[in-house]
Each structure stands twice: as C-alpha cells, then as structure tokens.
C-alpha cells in the first residue's frame, strides 16, 4: 500500500477511457479522497490478519472452519451457552449462529442439546475435539501476534492495541449523516 495516496491495486483515473459522465477531475478527486482512511486501513489490516489466521488453521488440518464458526466459539461459554446468548454476544443473527453451531456439531466440535432452563432453547457445549480446536485457535492467534511483533516491534503493537481498544470502548455520540 502506498500510504498517503491511492493504495496499490487502485489505479489512478484514466481519462482516456472514461465510461462515466462524471468529469474526470471529480473522479480523480474521489479516487484520492477515499483512501486510505482509518476505517479502511483497519479493515484491510483485519483482512491480512484473518487470511493468515485461516491459512494457519488450514495448515493444521482445520480446513472447514470459517469466520462465523470462530465467532461462535469465541462468544460461547465453554461450559455451555444457548444459541441466543451466543447471538447476542457476537452480534450475529440467531439463525447464522444456529447454522454455524450445527456445522460445528456435525464436525464433532460442539454438542447441541435442549436447554435444561428453557424448553424452547438449545444449549451448546464444547466437545473434547472442540477443546482441541480451541487450543489450536489460541495457539494460532499467539503465533500471529508474535509475527506482528517481530515485523512491527513490540512497542508499536502495544500502541496499536491500546489505540484500537480506545476506539472500541470510546463513548462516541450517535452516528449522524455528515
């Protein structure tokens, strides 16, 4: 990525082959202005980390695991949670949580049973195979963080972590149209 300009892969506006009725000067200004804002950089950084994470899981033999699966695992109590609790904690719809949990159950990582507290609810618990996966996930995340520390320096990672935690926990006013 070229910091301070248009990222690699986003070519400058070519006015010789402009299919739009928008003036080329306006397109060029929009092209430059849209990158690389903080949100976009955080999103792209997440993508780099995510892709490396799932590649490492695949190297360890966990090829069917996706982002929703890991979010379900991350947001469930290891001693058991209902699908609704996981959905609420993760911000994923109950239907998506139920689908991912069924897939994890079919793979042998979770067990889904009727809740003892609510006849309408399903309770999710981790299996021994699921605990193995959970350990691999934790190890994989640790490896990724160590790689980032080696690449960027421990202090940079600590500052980045504090800054992102600040964004997550900031009490911002409600979003409004600009």
Image (tube, grey):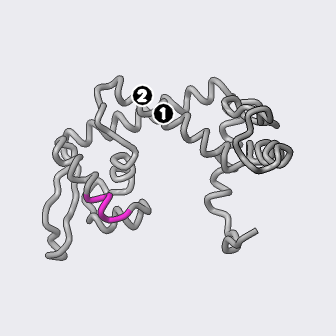
User: Vertically, is 97 above or below 149?
Assistant: below
Q: In the depicted view, which residue is nearer to us: 128 or 98?
A: 98
Horizontal relation, residue 93 to residue 40: left or right: left
* Residue of label 1: 51
Q: Quadrant of the N terminus?
A: top right
Q: In the depicted view, which residue is nearer to us: 7 or 113?
A: 7
- Residue 94 in percent (x, y) is at 32, 65
Residue 90 visible, this angle:
yes
Classed neighbour count for the residue bearing mark 1: other residues with Cα under 10 Å, few (<14), some (14–19), many (≥20) = few
Q: In the depicted view, which residue is nearer to us: 7 or 67?
A: 7
* Residue of label 2: 55
* Residue at the (56%, 26%) spot, across then down: 147
- Secondary structure under tag 1 reads helix
Which numbered tag is attached to residue 111?
Answer: none
- Residue 138 in percent (x, y) is at 40, 38
* Residue at the (18%, 48%) spot, across then down: 105
- Residue 66 in percent (x, y) is at 36, 42
User: Vertically, is 63 above or below 21?
Assistant: above
Residue 3 visible, this angle:
no
* Residue at the (28%, 64%) spot, across then down: 83
* Membership of 26 in magenta stretch: no
- Residue stretch in magenta: 93-98
Horizontal relation, residue 129 to residue 60: left or right: left
Circles 2 and 1, Cβ within 8 Å, touching? The answer is yes
- Residue 133 in percent (x, y) is at 29, 37
Q: In which quarter of the image is the C terminus?
A: bottom right
**Marks 2/1: CA–CA distance:** 6 Å
- Secondary structure under tag 2 reads helix
* Membership of 96 in magenta stretch: yes
Horizontal relation, residue 45 to residue 116: left or right: right
């Amino acid at each position: 990525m070229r910091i301070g300009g248009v990222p690699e892969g986003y070519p400058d506006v070519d006015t010789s082959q402009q299919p739009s009725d928008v003036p080329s000067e306006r397109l060029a200004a929009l092209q430059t202005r849209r990158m690389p804002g903080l949100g976009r950089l955080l999103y792209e950084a997440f993508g780099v980390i995510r892709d490396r994470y799932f590649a490492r899981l695949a190297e360890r033999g966990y090829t069917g695991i996706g982002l929703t699966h890991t979010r379900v695992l991350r947001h469930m109590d290891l001693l058991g949670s209902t699908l609704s609790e996981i959905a609420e904690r993760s911000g994923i719809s109950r239907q998506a949580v139920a689908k991912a949990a069924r897939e994890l159950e079919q793979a042998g990582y979770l067990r889904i049973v009727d809740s003892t507290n609510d006849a309408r609810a399903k309770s999710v618990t981790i299996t021994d195979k699921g605990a193995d996966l959970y350990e691999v996930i934790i190890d994989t995340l640790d490896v990724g963080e160590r790689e980032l520390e080696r690449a960027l320096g421990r202090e940079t990672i600590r500052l980045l972590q504090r800054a992102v935690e600040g964004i997550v926990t900031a009490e911002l006013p409600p979003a409004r149209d600009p």
